[in-house]
Image (cartoon, rainbow, N blue to C red):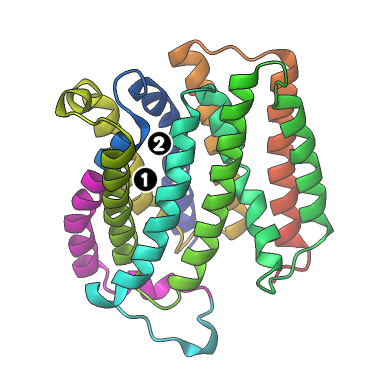
């Protein structure tokens, strides 16, 4: 079991790395293509790429989705057919579309590193929104949120108006991602997680395409100019990282999993610094440090305190 746990945590670490690095191609793509058009390509193609992965994993590990149900309250039967997964996948696809649109557009105004860090805030918003659904939380969560908000204040640059707009858009996207995570948590107890994910990406891609046709001037040339960022997002950020996360959830210790996932923010910051030469001031680094500390405190408490 120990070996399986280590393997699972390595898969999670790779997923966090791929997602953290993704902020670089997301930022680079904005020089060539508009935000919604970029999301349309990356999610729709990523969803198509997941279809053969889903069928392969379903044959190789038919119990995969069932093993992932956290406690299956009320003895829910998990629906495995594509048709059964369509409505839930469409709901998740809508939230993903909204969150990804806000996040992607924010990169026109703010840096990849900052966007990566503020996006990580969704890990803290999940328990807060969960309160309204009757989920319990404890003082560790509130301490973590306090630290992270202080970090967000230090990170925000009120003199740079356009950057502040970008930061606020990322924060709004983190809120939407938290709603999406809670929706997914409910749905994966009832429906096959892999098929839900696949439907979610395809729906998100289609909604992004429709929105792009309405408010942008998408062209095939812009997509070709942004070919490598689209390819990275479709292969590594969507198909591979998401599959790694699903496979890892079976065996990773929950407390370790959340800490590993919060490293996505750190990877985003390092990638922005190394690859895009983004430099953060001492004040911004302090803000990032406080936000990371807040995430870790909150989740440490949730897994040692009175966890629901």
Residue 231: x percent and y percent?
24, 33
Q: Which residues are magenta?
A: 44-70
Q: Which mark is residue 18?
A: 2
Residue 47: x percent and y percent?
25, 51
Label 1–label 2 contact, CB within 8 A? yes
Residue placed under numbered mark 1 in the picture: 241
Which quadrant of the rendered structure holds the C terminus? bottom right
Q: Quadrant of residue 151?
A: top right
Residue under the point 31% across and 53% down: 201
Q: As rendered, which of 117 and 59 lies closer to the eye? A: 117
Residue under the point 43% across and 69% down: 68
Residue 76: x percent and y percent?
45, 86
**Disc 2 crowd, CA 10 A, few/some/many (<14, 14-19, 20+):** many
Q: Magenta span: helix, strand or loop, mainly? A: helix
SS type, badge 1: helix
Of mark 1 and mark 2, the one earlier in the sequence is: 2
Residue 54: x percent and y percent?
23, 61
Q: As rendered, which of 59 and 120 lies closer to the eye? A: 120
Residue under the point 49% across and 56% down: 5
């Amino acid at each position: 079991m120990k070996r399986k746990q280590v393997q699972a945590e390595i898969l999670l670490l790779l997923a966090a790395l791929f997602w953290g690095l993704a902020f670089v191609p997301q930022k680079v793509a904005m020089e060539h293509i508009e935000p919604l058009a970029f999301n349309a390509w990356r999610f729709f193609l990523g969803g198509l790429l997941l279809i053969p992965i889903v069928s392969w994993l379903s044959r190789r590990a038919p119990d995969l989705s069932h093993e992932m149900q956290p406690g299956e309250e009320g003895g829910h039967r998990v629906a495995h057919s594509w048709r059964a997964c369509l409505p839930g996948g469409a709901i998740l696809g809508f939230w993903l579309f909204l969150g990804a649109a806000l996040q992607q557009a924010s990169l026109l105004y703010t840096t990849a590193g900052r966007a990566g860090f503020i996006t990580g805030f969704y890990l803290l918003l999940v328990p807060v929104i969960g309160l309204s659904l009757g989920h319990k939380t404890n003082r560790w969560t509130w301490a973590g949120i306090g630290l992270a908000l202080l970090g967000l204040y230090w990170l925000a640059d009120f003199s740079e108006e356009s950057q502040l707009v970008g930061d606020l858009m990322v924060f709004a996207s983190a809120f939407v991602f938290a709603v999406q995570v809670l929706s997914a948590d409910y749905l994966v107890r009832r429906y096959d997680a892999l098929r839900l994910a696949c439907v979610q990406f395809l729906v998100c891609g289609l909604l992004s395409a429709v929105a792009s046709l309405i408010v942008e001037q998408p062209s095939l040339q812009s997509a070709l100019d942004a070919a490598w960022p689209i390819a990275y997002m479709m292969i590594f950020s969507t198909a591979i990282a998401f599959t790694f996360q699903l496979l890892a959830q079976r065996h990773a210790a929950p407390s370790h999993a959340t800490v590993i996932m919060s490293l996505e923010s750190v990877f985003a910051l390092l990638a922005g610094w190394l690859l895009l030469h983004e430099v953060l001031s001492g004040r911004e680094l302090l803000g990032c440090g406080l936000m990371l500390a807040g995430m870790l405190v909150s989740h440490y408490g949730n897994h040692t305190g009175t966890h629901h």
